[in-house]
Image (cartoon, rainbow, N blue to C red):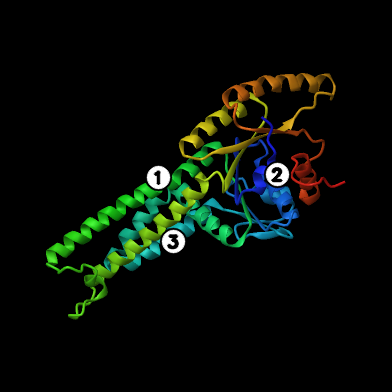
């Protein structure tokens, strides 16, 4: 099934590009972003890949603070280490404000252990991605996410549901604790009066104020993750594009990634087979193309309903706006530059 990448992208607000490392995800992401910017859309291109290839590809510094690449196209490279540190700093500030002063040392020890805990980096990046999605939906016509290699991407797509469920559990525990405390105090019919202050003059205690703030934080977090999950799983809003090479490992990894994404409720809108060998490039490249055909047959058998586009092997490196514009033209995204 033939993929029309422009039609897929033009109808969406978010495009997520994933795949095995080294297959050209950043080039495809950049071509999509540039093509849509040249068609008049305001586009935000964001890389979550710690390899930081975005700046190298465009020949300019991008960084975590972001930069304007061309008119209508802004870009950000999310720095995992910086994102994790800022996330822990925010958590630490909040905990120190909520906990008694004499527990400050415990907070510091807890955060030191959490810094290297499994999943901490992914959770911190997910928080940042959630912020970026909210910002892009409000300020941009299109968000293009250039993701880390397949395993990281599959976890990133599944995390919103997992963290929403975890946050719901915390909220239920907080609710039970609040009701128990109210029962112990023998309060009347209006439990909210204990927090807000009732007409009889009851003023909220430090613990009650803390509980209100904790609940507010959890509710905001749940709403943010719920929005992210709804965006990622809405095929009318988000297109997930997998980039691969016509080789054994990328093909098998693509089949597995599609299975994982489907399990997380994320629909794969199309495949881009990058650097496809020409059939008329001489005996060596013709033999190479036959080799690629065998693996693409495996792909067709495993994913017959996922449309596919084949991007040709190019003679030159993709660097800068002109090179990416030519690549966008090869993908059918915009008119190629002469």
Query: CB of mark 2 within 8 Å of CB of mark 1?
Result: no
Left or right relative to 261: residue 171: left
Secondary structure of the residue carrying numbered label 3:
helix
Residue where numbered disc 1 is placed: 162
Earlier in the chain: of badge 3 and badge 1, it is 3
Label 2, residues with CA under 10 Å away: few <14, some 14-19, many ≥20: some
Earlier in the chain: of badge 3 and badge 2, it is 2
Determine which quarter of the picture holds residue 244. Answer: top right
Q: Residue at x 69, y 51 (%)?
A: 55
Between the C-alphas of marks 2 and 1, the distance is 32 Å
Q: Which label lies toward us, 3 or 1?
A: 1
Label 3, residues with CA under 10 Å away: few <14, some 14-19, many ≥20: few
Quarter of the rendering occupied by the N terminus: top right
Q: Residue at x 65, y 21 (%)?
A: 297
Label 1, residues with CA under 10 Å away: few <14, some 14-19, many ≥20: some
Residue 235 coordinates in the image, percent (x, y):
55, 43
Determine which quarter of the picture holds residue 112. Answer: bottom left
Tell me the tag on residue 89: 3
The correct choice, above or below, for 312 with respect to 180 in the image is above
Left or right relative to 83: residue 53: right
- Foreground: 35 or 78? 35
Secondary structure of the residue carrying numbered label 1:
helix
Total marks placed: 3
Q: Which label lies toward us, 2 or 1?
A: 2
- Foreground: 222 or 249? 222
The correct choice, above or below, for 106 with respect to 259 in the image is below
Secondary structure of the residue carrying numbered label 2:
helix
Between the C-alphas of marks 3 and 1, the distance is 23 Å
Residue where numbered disc 2 is placed: 6
Earlier in the chain: of badge 2 and badge 1, it is 2
């Amino acid at each position: 099934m033939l993929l029309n990448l422009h039609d897929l992208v033009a109808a969406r607000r978010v495009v997520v590009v994933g795949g095995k490392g080294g297959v050209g995800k950043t080039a495809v992401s950049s071509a999509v972003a540039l093509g849509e910017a040249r068609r008049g859309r305001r586009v935000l291109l964001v890389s979550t890949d710690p390899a930081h290839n975005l700046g190298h590809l465009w020949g300019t510094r991008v960084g975590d603070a972001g930069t304007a690449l061309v008119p209508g196209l802004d870009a950000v490279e999310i720095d995992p280490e910086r994102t994790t540190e800022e996330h822990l700093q925010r958590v630490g500030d909040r905990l120190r404000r909520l906990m008694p002063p004499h527990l400050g040392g415990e907070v510091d020890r807890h955060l030191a252990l959490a810094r290297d805990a499994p999943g901490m980096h992914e959770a911190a990046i997910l928080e940042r991605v959630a912020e970026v999605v909210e910002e892009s939906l409000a300020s941009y016509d299109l968000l293009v996410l250039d993701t880390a290699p397949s395993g990281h991407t599959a976890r990133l797509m599944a995390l919103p549901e997992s963290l929403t469920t975890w946050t719901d559990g915390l909220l239920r525990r907080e609710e039970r604790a609040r009701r128990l405390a109210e029962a112990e105090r023998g309060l009347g019919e209006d439990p909210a009066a204990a927090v807000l202050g009732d007409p009889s003059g009851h003023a909220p205690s430090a613990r009650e104020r803390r509980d209100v703030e904790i609940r507010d934080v959890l509710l905001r977090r749940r709403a943010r993750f719920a929005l992210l999950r709804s965006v990622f799983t809405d095929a009318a809003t988000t297109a997930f594009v997998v980039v691969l090479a016509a080789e054994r490992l990328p093909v098998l990894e693509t089949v597995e990634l599609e299975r994982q994404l489907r399990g997380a409720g994320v629909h794969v809108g199309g495949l881009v087979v990058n650097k496809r060998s020409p059939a008329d490039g001489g005996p060596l490249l013709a033999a190479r193309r036959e080799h690629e055909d065998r693996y693409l047959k495996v792909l067709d058998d495993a994913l017959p309903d996922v449309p596919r586009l084949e991007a040709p092997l190019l003679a030159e490196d993709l660097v800068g706006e002109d090179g990416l514009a030519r690549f966008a033209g090869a993908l059918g995204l915009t008119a190629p530059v002469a």
